[in-house]
Image (tube, grey):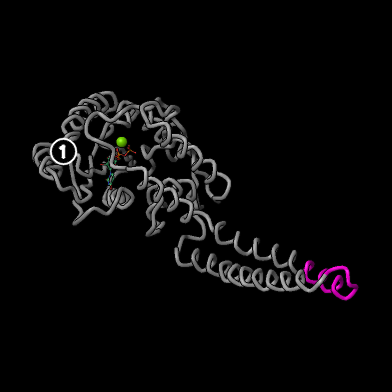
Amino acid sequence: MKLISIVVPCWNEEEVIPFFYDEMNKTLNAFGKECDDVEFELIFVDDGSKDKTLELIKSYAKNDSRIRYVSFSRNFGKEAALYAGFENAKGDYVACMDVDLQDPPGLLPEMYRAVSDEGYDSVATRRVTRKGEPPIRSFFARRFYALMDKICSTEVVDGARDYRMMTRQMTDAVLSMGDYNRFTKGIYGWVGFKTKWLEFENIERVAGETKWSFWKLLIYAIEGIIAFSTVPLEIIAWIGGALTGISFIFTIAAIICLITGIWGSLPLVIAVIMFFGSMNILAVGIAALYLSKTYLETKGRPLYIAKELT
Ligand code: UDP
Ligand code: MG
């Protein structure tokens, strides 16, 4: 028998959980009938909910032995909830999905087939449309992914959802990344492995409201960039270097022009001020280069992740 763990982060989701449970129950029962060598565990992670989320989860867990849960002492955020779910998952395959049914459970059998039979290590999903989302949010989301693509060492796919299924090996690799400022979407790319992408149209929340305000998303986006790119730090050194070079040439020219009487002394004063200003930026930039290396060291990420060994 193969065990599939499904991690479900929940924060104040009392309105949605009954819909989710009904839908999942139907899907998993049908799936279990179709494939008689799979079992399931549903791991709900209550991310410090203040409503009846935990009570609901407990009541379902009482009657359904497939359900387990982790309940946080306060709201730690979805990233922490996913980590906790992965850490507690016992499955040979581990999936994660939102509780609001924006991630269609009907894809689970196809995902399972890809990781069990088709040789993939993970199956990820992305939505190809953002229908139903405020246009301004979609606009900034697109810009964010384009920027991430340019400055990050790891690939982050536009429209990628957190909905995915992974092998035990890949789950362990994701867990070996102990990043405190976690950006799981980047971590999936960082650990590598062979991923199949499934696409679907955006589905709106079945009930309740999104937990992400525009500002929360913006902070999340900045966190994503900082977690996977040291480019913002390196830019300071480049700018400092370029300005120092330019103002050095300007200073020499101003001295020559002062001696030959073409310019007065004002350009030289400006050039000297510019030169020392640029040196300041360069000095900060050099410190930033060391900081960027130290930053990566403190993350304590594995040096490599082996997929196969003799
Ligand atoms: N969530 C969470 N902790 C948080 C925010 C969200 O566990 O601090 C969960 C939430 O309950 C849901 C999932 O993360 O299951 C996605 O949240 P939401 O649907 O609000 O995000 P959106 O789909 O709008 O991006
Ligand atoms: Mg949602």
Q: Decide whether residue 202 is among the magenta residues.
A: no
> Magenta segment range?
249-263
Q: Position of residue 195 (x, y in %)?
A: 47, 38
In the displayed structure, 40 sits above or below 47; it is above
Residue 22 as seen in the image, left or right of residue 97: left
Tag 1 residue: 14
Which residue corresponds to the image point at 57% horizontal and 56% vertical from the top-left?
Answer: 231
In the displayed structure, 284 sits above or below 93; it is below
Q: Position of residue 58 (x, y in %)?
A: 11, 43
Q: Helix or strand or loop: what does disc 1 sit on?
A: loop
Residue 27 as seen in the image, left or right of residue 256: left
Residue 81 as seen in the image, left or right of residue 220: left
- Hey, which residue is sitting farthest right in the picture? 260
Q: Decide whether residue 262 is among the magenta residues.
A: yes
Viewer-proximal residue among 77 and 186: 77
Look at label 1 and name its amino acid. Glu
